[in-house]
Image: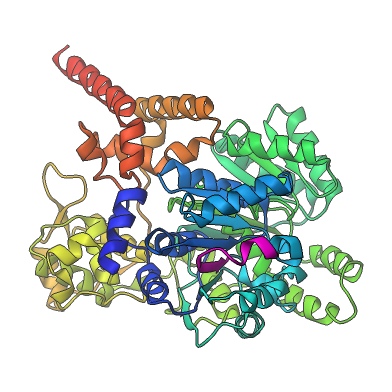
Amino acid sequence: MMDKAFKVLKKYYGFHNFKEGQDKIIESILERKDTFALMPTGAGKSLCYQIPAVLFPGVTIVISPLISLMKDQVDSLKAIGISAAYISSSLTFKEIKEIIDDADIGIYKLLYIAPERLELDSFVKIIKNISISQIAIDEAHCVSQWGHDFRGSYRAIAPFVEALKERPVITAFTATATEYVVKDSLSLLRLKEPEIFSVSLARDNLLLNIKKVDNRDEKLEFIMNFIRRNSEVSGIIYMPTRKETEELQKYLLSLGIRAGKYHGGMEEKERSFYQEEFIYDKTPLMVATNAFGMGIDKPNIRYIIHYSIPKNIESYYQEIGRGGRDGDPCSCYLLYNSKDAALQEFLLKNSSSIDRLPIELAKLEKMNEYGSCEGCLSNYILEYFGEKALKDYCSCCCNCVNNSELKDITKESQMVLSCIYRTHEKYGISMITDILKGYRGPKISEYKLYNIPTYGIMKKYSSKFIKDIIHTLLREGYLDKKENTYSMVKLNSKSINLLKGKERLFTKLIGEEEEEVTSSPLFLRLRKLRRELAEKEGLPPYIVFSDSVLIEMCRALPESKEELLELKGIGENKSEKYGTEFLNIIRLYKGQKVNEIRG
């Protein structure tokens, strides 16, 4: 079945490899085992149940907490050629019945519903008799009152499953849950002998920064300077209260900065307007309370600023997890003043029940500790969620990157160099990273690269860390780039000395310097075309193609639809639908470059 899963991955999603943990989770689901997966935001949770949904007979019911999230998922699935629908409160009973009947005869492979639907006897009566192969529960931590986002309606899921004539496979997914919340969720959802997967919560493309500030003026000065440097990219500023959200948005507008706003006290029509402006790339910045973001799947958010500390680590990690979902870097800044904790404590005391208040105050204390943490910020978060830190430092937080102390990366460098040697210098940086991580994509399977001794020997390291090592080796002269290639590398005499232990490498890790692709004329032309196509179809631009796909087009300069399909993130449906227009722009650009050279 996994061979079929790889074909679905390539055909519809345009990916050549599964992300970390996805293959094992999908394999468990295809074997019809109840499955619980703890995966960070952006790790590809939805793909884990969508691929089995395509391969299973019958329909997959997806229980999701927000209409905006359902709509976004359904639009994305339709764009890649997978049939899906969602049920919202705006539909009549007759319309709902028609959707369910269509799902029963195979018109839809996935049907998204809110958990509140399962509390309605009239709805349960018509849906329980259709052929359901899988029930996928998104944001599964919502079932536990010990979690940070409890929703009582999730308690209706287990009784609904038990009322079905034939029990489907039950799958549950969450991005933020402590060990206790996971155990509580498993019990309340009544999963049977579940396979439990925990993908590392480390998000190495989230660049964690704490900026200590003494007062409001320092916060505003930082925000102004940062936004002016990043005026063309998408970002979110999280505010602690509705009043402060309104004040900051007005202040930004008065300075001529385009900014939307979002909080629970706004009219639904106004909230929807600002949300759409942000999703459709018309307004680059959203100023919001924590009411914003749960249903947002916008992949190209490049920065997230917290004006003050959130109420707990779970909320903080979920909120910064909305950045960089395309895998590219997202800068995360917490503007920290220890006095801000007093405001959060006041808000908690006025909103929490007597039973929950001690729990919430303990969580706030851990969040406050994070703000004053002098060690590795990534490790602090991982250890909070019960995950053992791999090493004392990372390459994606301000405390580690700004530390002038040199790190001994000899052992890690030898692993990388050994892999390049054993693969005969045939592959580029991304492929070397996949081999060292132990990913098992089509190319790795085709060339049996899983048989080489270095396969998977760095699986506990993040992909970013491995790539940083490779770029450090290039910068320090221990590796060379192959001529006329984008990322293929080769060994040299210094490589051999390091491999044999004749030298040791101490360095301050510096990540790969981002290329100025996004400011190139070709990228801007491709982005303009994307916006025009998206507006014509009434879709957010990223559903046509993400920024990372446009960047890949700029780097690879494909000349045919076959070459387009080789790029990560372009499946058959999108290649056929949009390929010709994007290829025409690339051909025109290449022709202009040739004329400039001849000029």
How far from the left and from the top, in percent, is residue 512?
35, 53
Q: Nearer the viewer, residue 313 or 93?
A: 93
Residue 401 shows in this picture: no
Q: Quadrant of the C terminus?
A: top left
Tally the marks.
0
Rendered view: 227 above or below 159: above
- 103 in magenta: no
Question: Which colour scheme appears in the figure?
Answer: rainbow
Rendered view: 543 above or below 138: above
Q: Nearer the viewer, residue 453 or 174?
A: 174
Q: Nearer the viewer, residue 298 or 591?
A: 298
How far from the left and from the top, in percent, is residue 152?
77, 71
- In the rendered view, does 508 fall on the left or right side of 535? left
- In this view, the residue farthest toward the top is 599
How far from the left and from the top, in percent, is residue 468?
33, 61
- In the rendered view, does 571 fall on the left or right side of 152? left
Residue 359 shows in this picture: yes
In magenta, the rendered stretch is 125-137
Name which residue lies at 11% across and 45% down. Answer: 483
How far from the left and from the top, in percent, is residue 71?
60, 46
Q: Quadrant of the N terminus?
A: bottom left
Name which residue lies at 46% across and 64% down. Answer: 49
Figure quadrant of residue 498 = bottom left
Rendered view: 478 above or below 237: below
- In the rendered view, does 545 fall on the left or right side of 139? left
Q: Nearer the viewer, residue 211 or 270?
A: 270
